[in-house]
Amino acid sequence: MMERWLPLASALVLLLPQPASRPAAKPEKVYSESPNTWFEAAWMKASVSPDGQWAILSGRSWVRLADLTTGHEEPERLLGDLEAVFDAEFTSEGRIARRGRRGAERGWFLPAGEGLRLSPLPDDAVPQWSPDGKRVAFYRAREPQAGLFVGTLQEHKQHPLGGSVTGLAWSPWGGAVYALVYQPDGLSSLVRLIHASGKVETVARNLDAPFRLNSMGVARDGKHLYLALAGAGVPDSEARHRPEADRDLDIYEIDAVTGDLRPVVHTPADEFGPVVAKGSLYWTQNDINDSIVLVPAEGGAPRLAVEHAQLPYWSRDAKQLAFTYGGWRLADWALNLDAGVVDVNSDGEPISERTPVVVGYHEDFTPNWSPDGRWMAYHSHRAAAPVPAYGSEGATDDIYLRRAGAPMSEEIRVSDFGWEVGVADWSPDGTRLVFDSWDRGGAARFSVPWVATLDPEAGKVVSVERLPLPAGVRGVEWEAWSPTGDEIALIAFGGEDRRALWVVAVDGSKAEKLTEFSSSTYGGLDWTPDGKSLVFSALAGGRMQLFAIPRAGGPPRQLTQAQATLLHPQVSPNGRWIACTQTVQSKTIWRLRLGGEN
């Protein structure tokens, strides 16, 4: 899920044709921000208003409105008279349609005079309006196989397309709708629906596009379209799972008649979310740089330990450091994540090359060694064969166990109900694991903690049971077993950016809340080896920083004041160092004048 670390946008290679008498157009950066999250901002892309002044920035769980002429966000303008906005799109007139909530009303609200009125669009619709504003095309986010819907707000026809629609756009004259259709084999087709006849024409097949959240730009003359693709050909299914594969997204131009492809924006970064507005091509670019850093246990400046890595764990003798590598690659989201290990000296400095330790098809996270060092526990989406996408059939989402040094073929599946599983932590006696997971068979869409009891001699799972939560706590996002063995620390989710740090008895008989704090992501948690303090990550000054708090209670003490975001603290067994993820991210919006556009 990590990127190869990217050169600055000055390295853009642009292949757009230009008349010989004119110099080639150069891209212009029109917006930039530095997210303070872990992976959540990777999918954030921009929709641009027809006049090129405004951008709707939409991501995994938020939406924002930015003025591209000033770079300022306009939250009140986006909110209008709603209580909350969950998504938004520009209409053909440049006004803003909002999916949000107002009192008991929830759904898509459209501009009506100076206010907003609730429309009959389904709440999960992803809409685009025709150039004259009289018709709408949309697909259903919660019903991905439902196809394409085209018509008026009150009456629209469903067009099944044999796959999941992941992006759409109207032709400039409004007589056709283009849709990108994702197939179970991981390839996409670009189709054109002629509105008057309902005829569906295939423009291009076997496109190497992401499995969700695509957009496309259509040139004003209707002759070319722009899509984000990982390549011009059919991908190697094995390459999707390789951390080092060259599979970043680039912007391609597609001939609307022949379907021929040509790269127009190409860098080692992910370029995606292409749109055309006011004669220019706009796109979003990711620059995500994760690394493992070490912080002195008493606090101080972080020191680089391992580049291009995240989620550290120490071996029990402090002679090795394990981590996840591979990058947040949009085309192959999470498929390319593996886990590795380096040997380190007493100062935590690497003294060996990276050695892969957990590898296979789909996502593999960092292993956590058992107290005696004989076992490793880790989260994996293990699949028996290559799969094309994160949610493909044939993949799991569970905790696995393996003897240290044993081949991958000997891994043991601990849970069999997992859904968005977290990391696992060991009890001091090495007979139990605590982890969080959604319940695949349950209705709740938040994680709860589970305790797996093991027979470490036989390498068998004895039982997996729910850990009782304190009253009022619905879900958690991190757990750590205390060195004393009788308590488990939890980070409880409090809604939006609020979190709470709890310590609960292993049998659920008592619970104590140590502190509440702000957080923008999965910050992580660990105990000091003596069990007297806990280290966690929380928002401070707009960045996630490390804090320590006494187990006996008292105010948290800030340990770092880094300019980067610091996450997932893990205290070394000798108590000298805190290893953590350092992430530096940049999201930029670029603009390029298209030849022949006006």
Image (cartoon, rainbow, N blue to C red):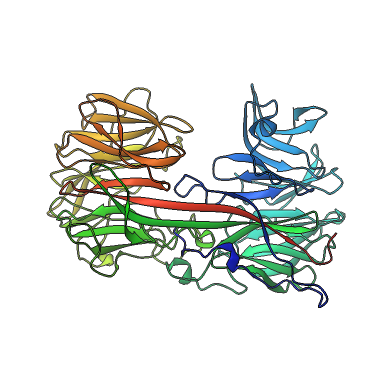
Q: How many marks?
A: 0
Q: Where, by quadrant of the figure, is residue 190 drawn?
A: bottom right
Return the x and y of residue 414 as percentages of the image width and height: 28, 50
Question: In terms of depth relative to the viewer, which is nearer, 367 or 136?
Answer: 367
Image height check: is 200 above or below 73? below
Left-right relation of 87 to 520: right
State whether residue 315 appears in this view. yes
Work out whether 3 lies above or below 95. below
Query: In the picture provided, is 557 more to the left or to the right than 119?
Result: left
Q: Is residue 246 above or below residue 467?
A: below
Residue at (56% x, 61% y) in the render: 270
Residue in the picture at 37% in, 46% down? 566
Q: Residue 462: where, in percent of width, then height?
A: 20, 46
The image quadrant that residue 255 belongs to is bottom right
Residue positioned 58% across, 60% down in the render: 210
Q: Quick one: quadrant of the N terminus?
A: bottom left
Residue in the foreground of this view, choosing between 153 and 17: 17
Q: Quadrant of the C terminus?
A: bottom right
Q: Residue furthest bottom?
A: 20
Q: Is residue 319 left or right of residue 291?
A: left
Residue at 64 percent across and 40 percent down: it is 72
Location of residue 295 in the rendering, given as x and y in whole percent from the top left corner: 28, 48
Viewer-nearest residue: 203 or 101 = 101
Q: Is residue 422 visible?
A: no
* Residue 280 left/right relative to 418: right
Q: Position of residue 174 (x, y in %)?
A: 85, 53
